[in-house]
Amino acid sequence: MAEEPSREQGAVVTEAAPTGQPRPPQSAAAAPTRDLRPQLAMNDDGDDEIADVAVKIENVGLWYGAKKAIDGVSLDIPRNQITALIGPSGCGKSTLLRCINRMNELIPNVRIEGQVSLDGQPLYGPDVDPVQVRRIIGMVFQKPNPFPKSIYENVAFGARINGHRGDMDELVRKSLEQAALWDEVKDKLNQSGLALSGGQQQRLCIARALAVQPEVVLMDEPCSALDPIATQRIEDLMQELAADYTIVIVTHNMQQAARVSNRTAYMLAQQDLVGHLVEYGRTEQIFTSPQDPRTEDYITGRFG
């Protein structure tokens, strides 16, 4: 049986019961002795301070039952920029992404420690509604998953159940325009979303996420199931959306991370099979002059 995980003083610990419902946070004790602090790529002035932090991740660790998945991850995510999480399969990228909007708590027997904050407000705590967290931090998944409803209802669904009282037609139009899909579907809004191509379905899912007016959009490998042309449209769309939203993307495609992101975090599961943050900084520096040799090995294709 795995040893009881060490817990840092003052951290918030959330456990998901077998039903998937989080239990009240508990205080934690002693930090790991191993120094696994990530290398930070410096800017030209020698510091890496982010002036406007949207999401702050502080010493986050997560267990699936007795299996520790990620440990001691801390990073600041800047507002209105694209942050990419890269690393080999099994390093905890998607797990960390789901910690940001508390999606992991839907999985039975998950335990989370540390804290994630949005605009300085903690997202883990006894008085925080995880459903509300998932409304203001939207998510787009790896495989397009439109509802078996019309294109219109796919976009309107989330806004309607969240009590939207404005002009629904205008909201649907605006969301589809933001997702660069309006011109392609404006004459067939009553047709099934399932009849669209794969790339169109993924943009429909992005429109659905935008319709509830989130502050942050998480994307878990949104282009992995798409052809190159559809991938380019999603990448162009991400860069357009960054003017209004903070975007965090998980990708196995290092060229994609280099093309679209402002900052990149490299994660790696070491011999203990626990994901750690190795290096985090501006994308240009991560890809051209990484400070950690493990990052360079991954970037140059020596492994992974």
Image (cartoon, grey):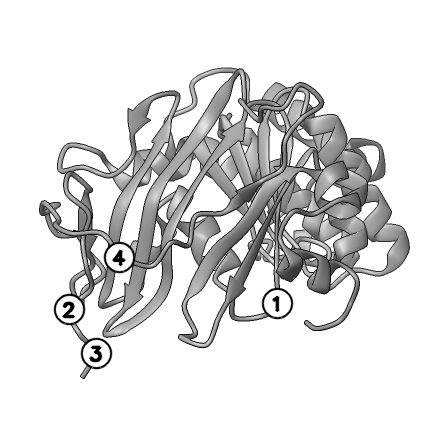
User: Do residues under tags 3 and 1 come within 8 Å of each other at their CB atoms?
Assistant: no
Q: Secondary structure at mark 4?
A: loop
Quarter of the figure with the N terminus: bottom left
- Tell me, yes or no, whether the two marked residues, 3 and 2, touch with CB atoms within 8 Å: yes
Q: CA distance from mark 2 to mark 4?
A: 12 Å
Residue tagged by mark 3? 2
Residue 56: image location, x then y, percent: 41, 32
Near mark 1 (Cα within 10 A), the count class, few <14, some 14-19 or many ≥20, is some
Residue 302 x %, y %: 75, 71
Q: CA distance from mark 3 to mark 2?
A: 7 Å
Residue drawn at x 61%, y 67% is: 88
* Amino acid type indicated by mark 2: Glu
- The tag earlier along the polypeptide, 2 or 4, is 2
Q: Name which residue type carries label 1.
A: Pro
Q: Nearer the viewer, mark 4 or mark 1?
A: 4
Q: Residues within 10 Å of mark 4 (few under 14, many from 20)?
A: few
Residue depicted at x 59% and y 25%: 245
Q: Is residue 284 above or below residue 266?
A: above
Secondary structure state at the residue bearing disc 1 = loop
Circle number at residue 88: 1
